Image (cartoon, rainbow, N blue to C red):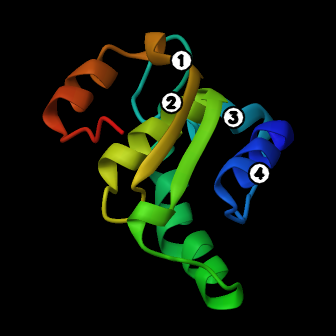
Amino acid sequence: MDEALDDFYKNNNLKVIVVGIDNGGSERTNELTPWENATYGDGKGDLYTDFIVETLKPYIDQNYRTLNDASNTTIGGSSFGVLISFYGALRNPEVFGNAIVFSPSFWFSDKCYDFTNEKALNKN
């Protein structure tokens, strides 16, 4: 990630703020999945995305010099992290204008495909 951000800065001359969020250990699957899965957990991802939208991002915007509009706000992750990031971006397009999606765990629930079809997806 750090090399990709270095390249991004060199190619675009833009500075970025990157915020990493640790997972809850044994609650990782529940935190990072928005839908219930009988085998893996009960999907409490709305709590996670609500925390980012209602608490974390406002704190960052108030305490750091940011461009706080959606077009300058990106969410991302890998594996379950990208599943919840993709979900969060579609659920909150007024907050997240971009999503970094690599190695997504879309296998977790077929509801992911239905949810994606219901939402307007920015193809950029």
The amino acid type found where label 3 is placed reads Arg
Mark pair 3, 1: CA separation: 13 Å
Q: Position of residue 20 (x, y in %)?
A: 76, 52
In the visual, does 87 lie left or right of 24? left
Q: Amino acid at mark 1?
A: Ser
Which residue is label 4 attached to?
10
Residue hosting label 3:
28
* Identity of the residue drawn at 77% across and 42% down: 7
Contact (CB < 8 A) between labels 1 and 2? yes
Determine the secondary structure under disc 2: helix
Q: Is residue 39 above or below residue 79?
A: above
Of the image marks 1 and 2, the number of the one nearer the N terminus: 2
Q: Earlier in the sequence, mark 3 or mark 1?
A: 3
Task: Answer with the quarter of the image where residue 4 lies.
Answer: top right
Residue 83's label in the rendered image is 2
Mark 3 or mark 1, whichever is nearer to me: 1
Within-10-Å neighbours for mark 4: few <14, some 14–19, many 20+: few
